[in-house]
Amino acid sequence: MTQHLPAIIIVVPLLSALLVAVFGWIKKTICFVIALPAMGIVFLSSIVLFYKVITENQPIIYFLGGWSPPVGIAYNIDHLSSLVLVLISGVTLAHLIATRQTVIEEFTNKVSAFYTLYILFVTGLMGIVATGDAFNLYVLLEIASITGYAMIGMNSGRAYLACFNYIIIGTIGACLYLLGVGYIYLVTGSLNMLDIASILPGLVDSKVVPAAFIICMVGLMVKMGLFPLHGWLPNAYTYAPSSVSTLMAPLTTKVMIYVMVRVALYVFTPVLSFSVIKPGNGFTWIAVAAIIMGSLMALSQQNIKKMLSYIVIAEVGYMVGGLWLGNRMGITGAILHIVNDAVMTLCIFLAVVSFSSYKKRDKLSDFQGAFKEMPVTAAVFCVAAISIIGVPPTCGFFSKWYLISGGLAAGHYAFVAALLFSSLINMVLFFRIIEIAYFEPFSDHHGKKHHVKIAEASPGLLIPLIIVACMLIILGLYTDELVTHVISHAIPAEIV
Amino acid sequence: MKKLGLIIVLICGSLMLYGTIDFPDWADPSSPASTHLSPYFIETAMHDTAVPNIVTAVLADYRGYDTMFETTVIFAAGLACFFLLRRFQRRAPDVNLFRHMPTGITLRIKKGGKVPVDSSEFERIDSIWVPYDLIIKTTCRLLIPFILLFALYVIAHGHHSPGGGFQGGVILGAGIILYAISHNLRAAKARIKERFDAYMCSAGVFIYVGTGVLCLLMGANFLDYSALAPLLGTDPIMARSHGILIVEIGVGIAVMAVMICLYYNLSSAGRQDEGL
Amino acid sequence: MNEIASFIIAKYNYWIYIVLMMIGLYAMIVKNNLVKKIIGMNIFQTAIILFYVSIGTKRGATIPIIYHGHGDGSHAVHATDYINPLPHVLMLTAIVVSVATLGVALAIALKVYRRYNTLEEDEIFTQIRRK
């Protein structure tokens, strides 16, 4: 059965989504009961796949429908994609357990529809990562997007307009990617990524290839929310239901950056991406702008979710910049940061949800006395915060270290400066929250000191939260192993 | 804003026009798109799958995995519409309106009043003015069976002529939507209940995925229909042809149900009373 | 003169798709009404569909349904006689995706209307600012 694992990681969640949709009409509580084992199976299968890829040291290729590529669609699971598969399924599993209560509160009589969309969303992301077919990627991208739109638009108030903008901008992004694939198809006649990669280097002189490259990249940049094209992101994440933004913020942008890495390194090949078309310098400058603007905008926010959304925008800049530095260190940093940032973002967003589980806390000033009420959540929040700032031994330090050394090796000092500047801003941001939450006394309107009661979130939320926080440190401690055994194999040998 | 938009659009447009210089000529038989993969499909599809319509063969077999997710996209859209719009009404309205069909008189019945539920001469309506037209109703009643029949033909004949699950499913859905438009949403809901429709959405996708899983259980790769040959009692090539038909039926059911779901929710803004 | 004419004939399908796409993009950027934006989005998607379908055409070829049908395997099938089926398959998927996006976008527009009682973007913004 192990040779069918690439199909199982997609089929099991898909089937469970259908089951949730049917049985949810009969009994609401059954949704979670179906979703949890499905996600558990997906997580275990991804780990087995990851292990297989590492031990055998070669990609697993699975022919769907029994047709070998380029005729049929193939799944191509190599070091890079198996790593991201484990990441997605792990993040989802932790998130699913942590938000069980929140989901019931937020979607009272539509829980089953929510879980169906939730599972489909994750299925889409898993498929995007696993697929080796450029057009199949678009279809899966649309599944992830449409379910994402629906989940974001479910909150009341400003969420509708934010969601509407997301639909319009997201559709432009996806369509541009589709158009880029069309250009590639026009000159190569193929849709399979490996096949395209073997044909494209022979077409160096064609003007269509750079056009395809630019169109694809712009589409992906819209989807990942890179700075000048980030318009949809802050509002969508801020006004989405909290059980949705905690899932989308760690996953959507990271998976899009994965797609960018995949398209740049495995479709257009390093030769075209870094030597012939050479967008590297320009893209890194865009990333520098993204980091600086994201950090500055984060500084001016009063709403905590909006502040975190702008930090996400800055982090997108880190990874894009690292990728387009074009050297081994930078790309290692970018891939490592995909993993680390997903876990960090999950941790910090879940901590914020935990803070507001009894009392609604949106604004920074609402956090007065919060740390005393919720000491465990506070500790987790601090771990996530120092990881985002980049303090060892948390994982955030190591990916930033690789990114900075990549920047120095490439001689791109502005990128290095932007990274340091952003760390500084993050430090200011998080210490401001810690100061408000820890040092400002919690007092009622009469100025009388209030006796602080400990009111932690439910264990269902706390346990995954603590595990995720521990992961931040474990990932930090095992960075070397991750880089030597996984990421160094994920980068093509041509890149030095 | 208008001028800025115009400038952006003009710049993008001219850049893209410049990009077309190196494009292969239109309808050039020697362009890469026509010479790399497509000859394989054209020359061997019939041999591999016994389906003369190459588009169907590529759609449901060579690239059947894409199509499975295509169905899932549609399913997700229907579900998304339900999720976003549906409002379950908890309390009954204060005033019930009924129309006496032969005379066209509208009755207002306050809460607690006697409601003419049993009589077939009365029809429940939701606003004072609901258009009623005997000619439209009768014409549609005559037309709808033929529309549905044609839809089944389109699904079944996808192997030999333009058609297939998506097209047939849309026509099926359109037939029922026409019924809902010509009568009203309540009448359509009496025929196809919301919950039944939701089950059909899932069932359609389930047929597709289930066929794939069946292939998996038979020991072949996911969606490799030739593994179904022992179950269908044919040779592997005909099994592919039959497998395509099975998934097309699944697609047809899913698309029909989703179209109905979209109409129910969009036309009544999620209240699912009388609709437009 | 002849060269220009043949150049135009060889490339005009691409120009048409770009023009259509830019019309859609313009509507999405500039239009104030949300439904008009949705229509722009649809035009944008349709332009890409047109582009793909125009890749598939082949001079002197017919639709990709094999003429002789079943039970007549002796006839050889030549690739030059039939147009490229792959773009048609891909566009069937893209059409379905665009229908799905349209459905979700309309649902959201309905929700916006229910909340703000208008579909004009500037009026919605003034309502948001007033609060």
Image (tube, rainbow, N blue to C red):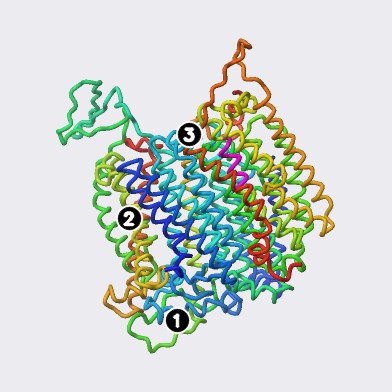
The Cα–Cα distance between marks 1 and 3, rounded to whole angstroms, is 60 Å
Quadrant where the image shows the C terminus of chain A: bottom right
Relative side of B173 to A136, left or right: left
- Label 3 belongs to which residue? A458
**SS at badge 3:** loop
Foreground pick, B26 / A495: A495
Q: Residue B267 location, x and y as percent?
A: 39, 40
Q: Which residues are magenta?
A: A343-352
Say what amino acid the circle numbered 3 marks. Ser
Seen in the picture, residue A13 relative to A191 is either above or below; the reply is: above
Q: Residue A367 location, x and y as percent?
A: 62, 27
| Mark sitting on residue B44 | 1
Judged by depth in the image, the label closer to the viewer, 1 or 2, is: 2
Q: Are marks 1 and 3 in contact (CB under 8 Å)?
A: no
Judged by depth in the image, the label closer to the viewer, 1 or 3, is: 3
Mark before the other along the chain sequence, 1 or 2: 1
